[in-house]
Image (cartoon, grey):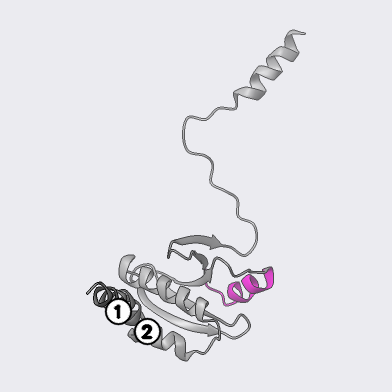
Amino acid sequence: QSGLFKMSEASEKASPQNWILLHPAYQQMKDLEVGDSAQVHAAFLVYMDLAEVRQWKEVTCVKIPELQAVLLEGREKEGAPIQTVLPLPVHRSLCHKSIRHVLDRGFPMLLCAVASDSTLVYQRMTDGLVTPDPPVGPFQDVGRRHHRKRRQKN
């Protein structure tokens, strides 16, 4: 009887993966034929996060032949500008040229690193350097002031 239990337990564990394969968005991504199944899987996980969890609007997938990758495009909310999201499995490397291909499309870009445990980390990418916002909080540059005071006393 324990053998039967293990078989049914194994089939139950396999079925959650099957729903992904049957999902219309996954089928659409697969039909783009990018050739990298790990990137397609990563794109699907990001799609689900954007469309179902974050409630982005008009989330679609696009093939970028130069990268052999699936990009996602969508709006954070109704009427917001379109943003491009590049889902990338953490084991896959990325070069400057690849980022340039995505940025040259003209939309704001998010890079989404997808870990093997399905953890997603989003990073906004920009065309050029961006000045950071000033720190928030009661920060003072006391180190320099003390140094100056000591010099003046000598």
Q: Which residues are magenta?
A: 96-108
**Quadrant in the rendering for residue 68:** bottom right
The residue most toward the right is 154
Report the residue at 52% width, 61% height from top.
Answer: 124
Q: Quadrant of residue 48?
A: bottom left
Q: Which residue is mark 2?
A: 21
Q: How many marks?
A: 2
Q: Nearer the viewer, residue 121 or 1?
A: 1
Q: What predominant SS class does the magenta segment belong to?
A: helix
Q: Residue 102: x and y, percent?
A: 58, 74
Query: Looking at the image, is 145 positioned above or below residue 125?
Result: above
| In front: label 2 or label 1 | 1
Extreme residue toward the left, this view: 1
The secondary structure type at the circle numbered 1 is helix
Q: Residues within 10 Å of mark 2 (few under 14, many from 20)?
A: some
Q: CA distance from mark 2 to mark 1?
A: 15 Å
Amino acid at dot 1 = Ser
Q: Which mark is residue 11?
A: 1
Label 1: how many residues lie within 10 Å, few (<14), some (14-19) or many (20+)? Answer: few
